Image (cartoon, helix red, strand yellow):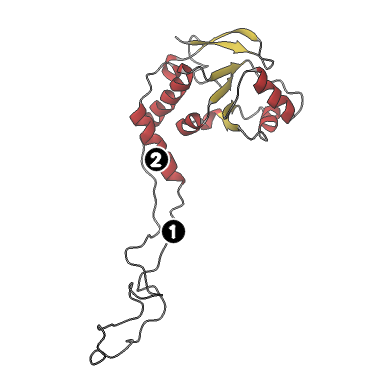
Amino acid sequence: MPSLKLKNQSGKEVGTVALSDDDFGRQPNVPVMHQVVTAQLAHRRAGTQSTKTRAEVSGGGKKPFKQKGTGNARQGSTRSPHFSGGGVALGPKPRKYSQKTPKRMIKIALQSALSDRANEGKVVVVDGWNFDAPKTSDAKAALAALGVSGRTLVVVKRNEINAIRSFRNLVDVQLIEVGELNAYDVLCNDYIVFTQASLPGAGKDGQ
């Protein structure tokens, strides 16, 4: 069972914390992570793009010129796709891009992403956030004391109001509630910072 040094908000070691083998000790499954992230990004697409076919463009009901005798190719409407102002042939229409992804696959992708960050030493666990009041400078100082730099994902509990308000204005910090943790956000950040309360697998035996 992997373990990490447990730190306080000032960056001092206060013990060790055991990590769940399921969540942090898995061999990263790259194909599953790729498929789940692709599906997640596809689900974010609005799919509202739309073009008009020749049937939807206004006008064009009158034949532009007579059928014979002009020397031109015969035409029935000025709204055909090859005319300027005409309809679009095979253009995009509103559609859903969502993909169905099994829950087990989503879980494996998250566990693989967390395990990958843990293998790189990019997972940090603090005993808790002790902000007396919301203050961005205190949050910035706490991350510096923990040795965290670059893009950082801070996983919080919903009731940690002072912590949420302290971290939310930092440019390189992404806040996420523990129930919203997903593979894409884990992979998009360099460091993942948990508290003991928000650590996945904290309620399992041996944690």
Instruction: Answer with left or right where residue 83 lies relative to residue 129.
Output: left
For label 2, the residue is 39
Q: Residue furthest front?
A: 71
Residue occupying image coordinates x 32% and y 63%: 90
Q: Nearer the viewer, residue 32 or 11?
A: 11
Q: Residues within 10 Å of mark 1 (few under 14, many from 20)?
A: few
Q: Residues within 10 Å of mark 2 (few under 14, many from 20)?
A: some
Q: Which quadrant would residue 83 be assigned to in this image? A: bottom left
Percent x, y of residue 21: 43, 14
Q: Secondary structure at mark 2?
A: helix
Answer whether residue 196 is visible to the viewer in this image.
no
Q: Mark 1: which amino acid? A: Gln
Q: Residue furthest left?
A: 68
Q: Is residue 32 depicted above or below 74 in this figure?
A: above
Q: Which quadrant would residue 53 be assigned to in this image? A: bottom left
Q: Which quadrant would residue 192 be assigned to in this image? A: top right
For label 1, the residue is 49
Q: Mark 2: which amino acid? A: Ala
Instruction: Give the alpha-carbon distance from disc 2 to disc 1, as whole Å.
Output: 19 Å
Q: Is residue 99 depicted above or below 129 in this figure?
A: below
Percent x, y of residue 156: 60, 27
Answer whether residue 25 is visible to the viewer in this image.
yes
